[in-house]
Amino acid sequence: MTDTLDIESNLMVAMFQEAHPIASLDTETEPSATKYLTCCAADIERLGRVFKSVGLAEASTESALGWKPTADLLHIIARQVVARPARPSQKQATANERKVVESLFQLAGGEAAEYVEDDFVFCVLNCLGLLRLDRVGGCKPTCLLQEIFEGVFGV
């Protein structure tokens, strides 16, 4: 990770800090962007695998993240600036929706049973309006994520 971050990396870290703050109890402020990248490197790598698999990021040796957002991801971020994280659904996830979520978490290097409300990947995808909780506490993809998934995988 570099000491000075490019604009895209700074944008992504700011969004990560909003979605998944890590301020400690003894300090009420978030760490610097470079410190956040160091603390959350494994989670950011997991998220990068998810984003790359659905065409929202591409590998980059020049980025402090190890990947850079595509124009589509930047568009989603810009749209979410005025929106809130996806609200919980009143419906339970269908079998197909659970498969989409399980696939994403497997791509992130985790097991489907591992995703929970405080998981970094879930928090960021929820902040972007791509995932939400269903009525029983499981994960459910939003229509936007389903469209992206269908566009990439044809499923």
Image (tube, rainbow, N blue to C red):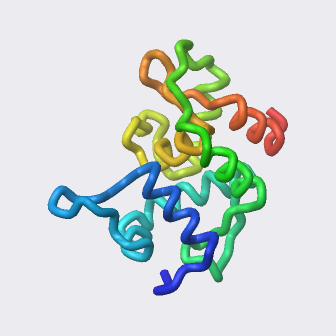
Residue 107 or residue 15, whichever sits in front: 15
The residue under the point 58% across, 65% down is: 11
Q: Residue at x 62, y 17 (%)?
A: 94
Q: Is residue 73 above or below residue 6?
A: above
Q: Residue furthest left?
A: 26
Residue located farthest toward the front when viewing the structure as drawn: 82
Height in image: 32 above or below 26?
A: below
Left or right of 153 in this view: 87:
left
**Most foreground residue, 70 or 82:** 82
Report the number of discs: 0
Which of the two residues, 52 or 82, is positioned nearer the viewer here? 82
Picture layout, residue 11 above or below residue 129: below
Q: Position of residue 112 (x, y in %)?
A: 49, 36
Residue 107 on image: x %, y % = 59, 49
The quarter of the displayed image where residue 34 is located: bottom left
Q: Depth check: 131 or 8 in front?
A: 8
Outermost residue, top side: 91
Residue at coordinates 69% horizontally, 53% vertically from top-left? 53
Name the quarter where the C terminus is drawn. Answer: top right
Query: Residue 88 location, x and y as percent?
Result: 50, 24
The quarter holding residue 116 reads top left
For the point 68% across and 70% down, the residue is 59
Q: Position of residue 152 (x, y in %)?
A: 80, 45
Figure quadrant of residue 62: bottom right
